Amino acid sequence: MRRENRKIWIARFALTFACAFVFAWIFSNSLKTGAESSAQSHAVTNAVQNVAQSVAPSSSVATAKGKAYENLHNAIRKIAHFSEFALLGALLIWCYLSYTKDKAFCVLPFGLILLTPIVDECLQTFTGGRGAELADVFLDTVGGFLGALVALLAVWAVRKILQRKKRKGGAIR
């Protein structure tokens, strides 16, 4: 196998594995009970507050209590939803592009970005203390699409840089 082919297959394997890992991570979070999910997100909120207390002790994040703490907790949960789906969107695009030369129409990754939040929220209805929220489906989908668009922009930028190097006679490895 040529060195170039080996690199492509390694990239494909790594990206496929990363996508599978993120899917598993998302769905495992959906299968946590309401109490488990809440405990996990409260732990993250407390960690964010601890960092804020070290960096900016008088900030609203560091001093949040009561209703302000619950608002911070809710914001952190929404940011987590958005971020995990943005990561999934980026990985799905890169994985798809590693397998095909038909890069003009990315139906599969965008279809998965649309379908995954629906499945994610439906899974939550089967766990104690959880339910499906349409707002979360929307937030997750927007996160996935933004991650995919950033990934496409990164691919476009890298290609432009490589094309410039090639035109100038620079070595491309």
Image (cartoon, rainbow, N blue to C red):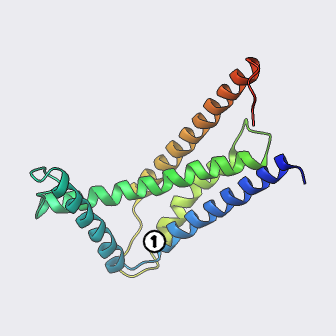
The quadrant of the picture occupied by the N terminus is bottom right
Image location of residue 58, percent across then percent down: 9, 51
Crowding around mark 1 (Cα neighbors within 10 Å: few <14, some 14 to 19, many 20+) is some
From what the image shows, is residue 106 above or below residue 117? above
Q: Quadrant of residue 151?
A: top right
Q: Secondary structure at mark 1?
A: helix
Residue at (74, 56) in percent of width and height: 10
Residue at (37, 74) in percent of width and height: 130
44 to the left or right of 26: left
From what the image shows, is residue 128 above or below residue 140? below
Image location of residue 53, percent across then percent down: 16, 57
Q: Check the image and name the residue furthest to the top.
A: 168
75 to the left or right of 13: left
Residue at (62, 55) in percent of width and height: 112
From what the image shows, is residue 17 above or below residue 158? below
Front one among 67 and 124: 67
Q: Which amino acid, mark 1?
A: Asn
- Residue that mark 1 sits on: 29
149 to the left or right of 1: left
The quadrant of the picture occupied by the C terminus is top right
Q: Quadrant of residue 13?
A: bottom right
Q: Check the image and name the residue furthest to the right.
A: 1
